[in-house]
Image (spheres, rainbow, N blue to C red):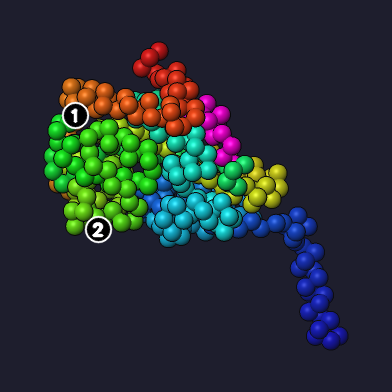
Amino acid sequence: MKKSTVFALVAAAVMAAVPLSAAHAKTYRAVFAGYFGPAHPNTAMMEKFKSELEEVSGGQFKIVLKPNNEAGGEEKIMELCKRGTIQIAQVGGLLKYDEPMIAAWEQPFVINSWEHARNVFLSGGMKPFEGQYTEKSGARIAGIIVNGFRQISCNFPVNSMEDLGRMKIRTPLNDVFVELFKALGTNPTPMPATELYTALETKVVDGQDNPYSMVESMGWYEVNKYMLESRHIFSPTFVIVNDKWYNRLDDQAKQWFDTAMTNAIKFNWDESEKGEAKTVEFLKSKGVTITIPSDEFKAQMIKASEPVWAWFDKEVPGSKEIRDYCASVDPARK
């Protein structure tokens, strides 16, 4: 018998031993991009999602992770995901450029605790306030993870409204934050997060606002040694998925994807909440002085922010309805 005939018979036997479903199983490849540092819970969430999805699908999903701005900054990865160049991305409030109502998800002093934040973002009650994001952008919101309670860092102590008034503060590329920090008396300076470390180091700006976890993961504590625990906004992070790519998944693949995403989101919220106290201790160990505002100072910040709610009501549809919804699920009011 010719060698070629033997090889053909062996190959046929091997193929016959492979289940038909495995032989014809689809493979789904996706790039999942983010802009958080290696130690951040949102990066850990990406790893959790990849691990579970690849395992449960028996390798039918192949997820390539691009955290820490590896695929570009926040705005770039958002646009790449909308176009389908990448398939999954973590993005903050920039989604408002496609659906303005999403800007009102980050109103000042409307979320008061971790329990309150979970009630707001994990109950499904914010779904109506996504508006027409998918129709306008080409991406869908697959879930909400944590950026967290935003705090203020500075290169000098901030203990009063007068101290705030001395600050030149970096804000995200988002007019919501510009309006807020104008109301608080600071000099807001929008810039990308990728430029922030150098801007703090060279004192182009005095400080910035971000959750503790971002200050740790991005190393900003090295160049800003004072923080005010203002907790002025709770910022969600959106996990978006290219809509056309998602709709090409078969029913089983969608189930695997959705379950892995749900589990990774729960993991993220748990790790973020537990990690906040640990991050505070880490920052203190690195020489950062953290100030808890007095009741009077906190009340002054809230009072100064009231015009921002009026700005939201004028500029952003659904703003009052979102505030009312947040108030309705505040455990402190029950």
Residue 113 shows in the view: no
Q: For this rendering, which residue is in front, 318 or 19?
A: 318
The relative height of residue 318 versus residue 253 in the rendered view (above or below) is above
Relative to 246, residue 291 above or below = above
Label 1 belongs to which residue?
293
How far is mark 2 from mark 1, CA to CA? 28 Å
Mark nearest the camera among 2 and 1 is 2
The image quarter containing residue 93 is top left
Question: Would you call the spot at circle 2 few (<14 residues within 10 Å), some (14-19), or many (20 or more)?
Answer: few
- Residue 134 is situated, as x and y percent measured from the top left of the image, at 59, 42
Write the start and end of the magenta stretch as one range. Answer: 121-134
- In the picture, the disc for residue 56 is none
Q: Work out whether mark 2 precedes mark 1 in sequence or the reverse, and give the earlier one.
A: 2
**Amino acid at dot 2:** Thr
At x 49%, y 51%, the residue is 78
Q: Nearer the viewer, residue 222 or 17?
A: 222
Describe residue 264's horizontal placement relative to residue 140 as left or right: left
Furthest residue toward bottom: 2
- Image quadrant occupied by the C terminus: top left
Q: Say if the magenta span includes residue 34.
A: no
Whether residue 260 is situated above or below residue 60 in the rendered picture? above
| Secondary element at image label 2 | helix
Magenta stretch: residue 123 in it? yes
Q: Nearer the viewer, residue 261 or 296?
A: 296
